[in-house]
């Protein structure tokens, strides 16, 4: 885990190493000043030597400025290293997420990925900065100050040592109980983000169903859970603070008392006592810093684990060693295919599918909700891998192709489709970045998107809002079809892609395909039999199995599920569908 995180330092490695070195310089300067001050009091002030006071004062100023420079440089290098680390971590995660298969994405929730990319990385950045500044500086400052104190007065230094040991014990005990809460806090962030994400991205649905209050409550619950965890943790931190200060001041008091006695007895000079008091503050403050570093490390440990999980996640779909880049034709074969989303599931979603589709054929797919129509077609462009058997496109197993090449030849208009913020041209060019304006207009015309786009004030340059919120459902579907057509694929899969398009336009789109792209294999999933009845052949899906496969006429004659739905959709009771056969 630590290795994964640190390996992302890359170009910031050098600057990360220099940060503690600058800190060492700062500590040395800080440690020299108390000695100089002691001398100034003992020799200069007591002896009335003004020249010595000025000389020592100037030297002190020089050391202080040097310390300041070291401090500034240290601050700059650690900020730069930490910010750089955070950028690299985000980039590494984002890059890896792009390689994720659909099932990798199913594993991490979207909100989980967002937390990891934002909050978790910020956490790591903060604690890395803290570690760079304190992890070397504090222990070193403590050790040097302790050594100097022993050198100046072993008796008084023993008091420090006892105080330090006592404080360490106290801090250790507090930390142990505090860490437990801090660890839990970050797990709760996922819940919070989940609530925010779901609510905000689906705010229209929330409003339509007047669920604001319910969503509010859900959010409040998540926010309160984080609040109470933080309060529990901070309560302990709050008690620890005053207790430490109490020890620090008791210590100073004790030293002053002992020191006063020793000065009276002549075994200690006033200057040395002043130096000792400064070292005392140094030691105890460093101890506090060390404890803070520990808190930061624990707080970021969970984050580091969550971030490295994303960086190290391997896509479960990989290209073969010698991939094929050319899909020969649009023929599709399912050979004894079983498929389950969860490999450990008892019951597969698709069971023993055997199909053979010729290149250029038009195929309708019809079946009840949940009968696995979408699952069936997702295997063709290898959005998921089969659990058993093989899916072949153009005569070759889909696992033998380069994934990008395969997906460019097998275009899918997904059931749950998205447009992205940008102009209509930008959105269409997702299908083919090299497409000319003319190509885009050709595809839009085939998908019957041209009429409404041309009516828009800025035509094809109209800006589409995030998620396509400023176009209607049917318009969005038509733009998505146009986007897929720009790939000029060998196989086109439309998953319920004309559900929001009226029946007449639906027919025009289908006829345009036959006219303009006759050699393209078409798979059309639909709920309306009218959308598929003209297809060469129709697959009837029933509960993860192929119930029948044949032309409209053949199915009417022999497939009871099909004929019942056909009658219900065309007869007097024309609103039935596959979920409620007449
Ligand atoms: N990403 C997924 N993870 C786990 N299970 C899933 C996933 N997607 C679908 N399923 C399950 O697989 C089964 C088949 O779903 P599928 O989406 O293929 O049905 P469908 O025929 O396309 O339905 P619809 O007509 O409603 O689109 C369902 O029981 C569903 O719960
Ligand atoms: Mg579906």
Image: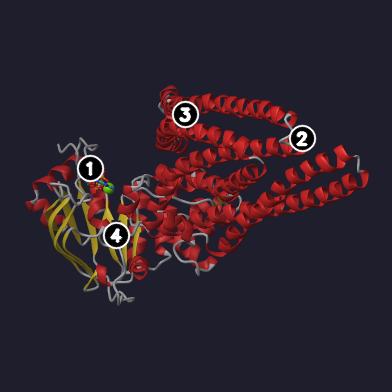
Where in the figure is residue 331, as x and y percent of width and height?
23, 70
Disc 4 from disc 2: Cα separation: 73 Å
Please give the residue where the numbered disc 2 appears in the rendered image.
270
Render colour scheme: secondary structure
Q: Do callouts 1 and 4 mark residues in contact (Cβ within 8 Å)?
A: no
Element type at mark 2: helix
Please give the residue where the numbered disc 4 appears in the rendered image.
316
Q: Do callouts 4 and 2 mark residues in contact (Cβ within 8 Å)?
A: no
First in sequence: mark 1 vs mark 4: 4
Pointer 2 local density, CA inside 10 Å: few below 14, some 14–19, many at least 20 = some
Disc 3 from disc 1: Cα separation: 49 Å
Q: Do callouts 1 and 2 mark residues in contact (Cβ within 8 Å)?
A: no
The label shown at residue 233 is 3
Element type at mark 3: helix
In the rendered view, tell whether residue 169 sits above or below residue 394. above
First in sequence: mark 3 vs mark 1: 3
First in sequence: mark 1 vs mark 2: 2
Q: Residue furthest front?
A: 265
Please give the residue where the numbered disc 1 appears in the rendered image.
369
Closest to the camera, between mark 3 and mark 1, is 3
Disc 3 from disc 2: Cα separation: 43 Å
Q: Residue furthest left?
A: 558
Disc 1 from disc 2: Cα separation: 89 Å
- Residue pictured at 72% horizontal, 28% vertical: 260
First in sequence: mark 3 vs mark 2: 3
């Amino acid at each position: 885990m630590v290795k994964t995180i640190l390996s992302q330092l890359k170009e910031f490695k050098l600057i990360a190493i220099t940060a503690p070195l600058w800190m060492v310089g700062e500590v040395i300067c800080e440690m020299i000043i108390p000695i100089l001050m002691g001398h100034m009091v003992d020799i200069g002030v007591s002896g009335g030597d003004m020249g010595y006071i000025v000389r020592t004062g100037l030297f002190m100023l020089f050391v202080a400025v040097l310390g300041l420079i070291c401090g500034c440089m240290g601050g700059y290098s650690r900020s730069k290293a930490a910010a750089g680390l955070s950028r690299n971590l985000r980039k590494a995660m984002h890059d890896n997420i792009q390689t994720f298969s659909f099932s990798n994405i199913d594993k991490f929730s979207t909100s989980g990925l967002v937390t990891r990319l934002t909050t978790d990385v910020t956490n790591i950045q903060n604690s890395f900065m803290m570690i760079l500044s304190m992890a070397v500086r504090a222990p070193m400052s403590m050790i040097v100050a302790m050594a100097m104190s022993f050198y100046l007065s072993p008796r008084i230094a023993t008091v420090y040592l006892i105080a330090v040991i006592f404080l360490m014990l106290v801090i250790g005990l507090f930390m142990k109980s505090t860490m437990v809460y801090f660890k839990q806090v970050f797990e709760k962030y996922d819940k919070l983000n989940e609530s925010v994400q779901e609510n905000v991205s689906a705010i229209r649905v929330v409003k339509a169903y007047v669920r604001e209050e319910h969503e509010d409550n859900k959010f409040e619950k998540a926010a309160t859970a984080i609040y109470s965890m933080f309060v529990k943790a901070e309560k302990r931190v709050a008690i620890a603070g005053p207790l430490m200060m109490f020890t620090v001041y008791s210590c100073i008091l004790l030293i002053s008392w002992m020191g006063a006695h020793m000065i009276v007895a002549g075994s200690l000079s006033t200057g040395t006592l002043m130096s000792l008091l400064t070292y005392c503050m140094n030691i105890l403050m460093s101890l506090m810093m060390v404890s803070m570093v520990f808190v930061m490390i624990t707080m970021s440990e969970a984050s580091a684990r969550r971030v490295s999980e994303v960086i190290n996640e391997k896509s479960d779909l990989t290209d073969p060693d010698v991939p094929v880049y050319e899909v020969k034709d649009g023929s599709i074969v399912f050979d004894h295919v079983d498929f389950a989303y969860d490999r450990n599931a008892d019951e597969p979603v698709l069971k023993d599918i055997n199909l053979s589709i010729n290149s250029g054929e038009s195929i309708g797919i019809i079946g009840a909700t949940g009968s696995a129509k979408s699952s069936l077609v997702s295997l063709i462009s290898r959005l998921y891998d089969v659990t058993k058997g093989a899916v072949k496109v153009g005569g070759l197993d889909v696992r033998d192709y380069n994934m990008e090449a395969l997906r460019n030849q097998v275009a899918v208009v997904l059931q749950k489709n998205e447009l992205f913020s940008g102009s209509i041209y930008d959105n269409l060019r997702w299908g083919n970045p090299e497409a000319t304006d003319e190509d885009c207009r050709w595809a839009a015309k085939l998908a019957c998107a041209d009429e409404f786009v041309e009516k828009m004030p800025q035509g094809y340059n109209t800006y589409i809002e995030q998620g396509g919120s400023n176009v209607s459902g049917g318009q969005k579907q038509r733009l998505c079809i146009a986007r897929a057509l720009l790939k000029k694929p060998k196989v086109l899969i439309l998953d319920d892609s004309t559900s929001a398009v009226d029946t007449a336009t639906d027919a025009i789109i289908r006829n345009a395909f036959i006219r303009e792209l006759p050699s393209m294999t078409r798979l059309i999933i639909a709920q309306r039999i009218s959308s598929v009845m003209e297809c060469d052949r129709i697959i009837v899906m029933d509960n993860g199995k192929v119930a029948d496969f044949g032309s409209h006429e053949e199915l009417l004659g022999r497939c009871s599920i099909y004929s019942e739905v056909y009658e219900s959709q065309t007869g007097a009771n024309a609103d039935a569908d596959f979920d409620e056969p007449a």
